[in-house]
Image: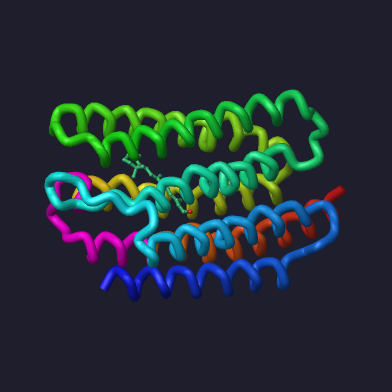
Amino acid sequence: MDQTAFMIGFTVMSLASLAIYTTGKKTPPSHHHTLLHSAVPFIAATAYLAMAFGIGTLIKGDGSATYFARYADWTVTTPILLSSLVLLAFHERGKTGEVGGYLTSIIVLDVLMIVTGLISSLAAAPLVKWVWFLWSCVAFLGVLYLLWGPLRAMAVERGTALGAAYSKNVSFLTAIWFLYPIVFLVGPEGLKIITDPTSVWAILVMDIIAKVVYAFFAASNLEKALHEHARQA
Ligand code: RET
């Protein structure tokens, strides 16, 4: 069951990476978005291939699995997805010091969110597991605060078109990212309400939406906004 999901994950992610690269803009000012968004499913394909081979899969004392490849994937891909939004908020602003500050802050919070989630997955004692889960949620709230507070204000300052594109992208991203802690909570790493295959399939669908569907959605909103932006200027 899991094997099929992992092989589908590998296939869909590799093809999607190629599709995002070949259909994406290769000229400034949006070429870096093409590179960022095609890198994400390429990394995910690698993680799914490892999971298909059972590499980095740990079966714990209670019989539940921790897929290290999944956390390795998220540790690298979620900062890339966030970087693309930060760069949109700072579109042609030229304040490299400020971009650097926001990138560092949001990446630190995001990586802490994933790593503390992994620690929660590994923890055997319920109290310890829930402390780490909550700590991960705190980091997640920090990421959301930066996205919806200062970064959104910055994007809106760039003009109505870019502000609207940022808002659409951040809304899509927030909606899909919220499902991850919920699936973790009810899944085998948490309350064990849903089984391991159910959670693997659910995360496969979520990964495709968060990485592939989002890439096309975000690129199309960005292109439309850049068009408007150029007309307004
Ligand atoms: C964990 C652990 C429990 C608490 C929280 C979590 C959040 C995970 C998120 C993952 C997003 C992954 C994406 C992957 C694909 O591109 C780690 C499940 C808050 C938000 C978007």
Determine the quadrant in which ligand 1 lies: top left
Q: Quadrant of residue 135?
A: top left
The relative height of residue 214 versus residue 150 in the rendered view (above or below) is: below
Residue placed most toward the observer, 100 or 6 = 6
Q: Quadrant of residue 3?
A: bottom left
Residue 72: percent from left, percent from top: 46, 46
Q: Which quadrant of the figure contains the N terminus?
A: bottom left
Question: Can residue 151 be found in the magenta stretch?
Answer: no
Question: Taking 84 as reference, is 107 left or right?
Answer: left
Residue placed most toward the observer, 6 or 100 = 6
Residue 189: percent from left, percent from top: 22, 47
Q: Quadrant of residue 123?
A: top left
Kindly identify the residue that appears in the image at 29 percent across and 69 percent down: 2
Question: Can residue 200 be found in the magenta stretch?
Answer: yes
> Magenta stretch?
187-204
Residue placed most toward the observer, 79 or 49 = 49
Residue placed most toward the observer, 49 or 216 = 49
Kindly identify the residue that appears in the image at 61 percent across and 58 percent down: 218
Question: Taking 56 as reference, is 158 left or right?
Answer: right
Residue 117: percent from left, percent from top: 33, 38
Q: How is the image coloured?
A: rainbow
Kindly identify the residue that appears in the image at 31 percent across and 67 percent down: 201
Residue 125: percent from left, percent from top: 14, 32
Kindly identify the residue that appears in the image at 84 percent across and 54 percent down: 28
Question: Taking 86 as reference, is 139 left or right?
Answer: left
